[in-house]
Image: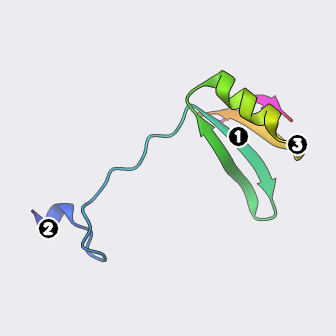
Amino acid sequence: MSRAFVKEESGEPWTPPAKAAEYRVWVETPSGPEAVHESEDLLGALHWLEARPHGRFELRTREGRLLALK
């Protein structure tokens, strides 16, 4: 295998970064906003959001547009 496709530090093959999900649920933490759930399905993301018992959550698109608050 070519050295161009091996990480220098660990000797592991390079893997491309994962594609960002279409929808993300964010929660505010002391260190700043953090994505706690990702989904390609809007209804699935809304159901996940509704199942959370408490807390302030934001559902946003990949581009950062706010869709729902809880």
Whether residue 65 appears in magenta in the rendering, the answer is: yes
Find out whether residue 11 is within the magenta segment.
no
* Tag in front: 2 or 1: 1
Q: Quadrant where the N terminus lies? A: bottom left
Mark 1 or mark 2, which is nearer the start of the sequence?
2
Q: Is residue 43 above or below residue 51?
A: above
Contact? badges 3 and 1 (CB < 8 Å): no
Query: Which residue matches tag 2?
Result: 3
- For the residues labelled 3 and 1, the Cα–Cα distance comes to 14 Å
Q: Residue furthest left?
A: 1
Q: Position of residue 50 (x, y in %)?
A: 81, 32
- Quarter assignment of residue 8: bottom left
Residue of label 3: 53
Q: Quadrant of residue 3?
A: bottom left
Rate crowding at label 1 as few (under 14), some (14 to 19) or many (20 or more) other CA atoms within 10 Å: many
Secondary element under disc 1, as helix, strand or loop, is strand
Q: Specify the farthest residue to the bottom.
A: 9
Which residue is disc 1 drawn over? 25
Residue type for callout 1: Val
Q: Quadrant of the C terminus?
A: top right
Tell me which segment is drawn in magenta. 64-69
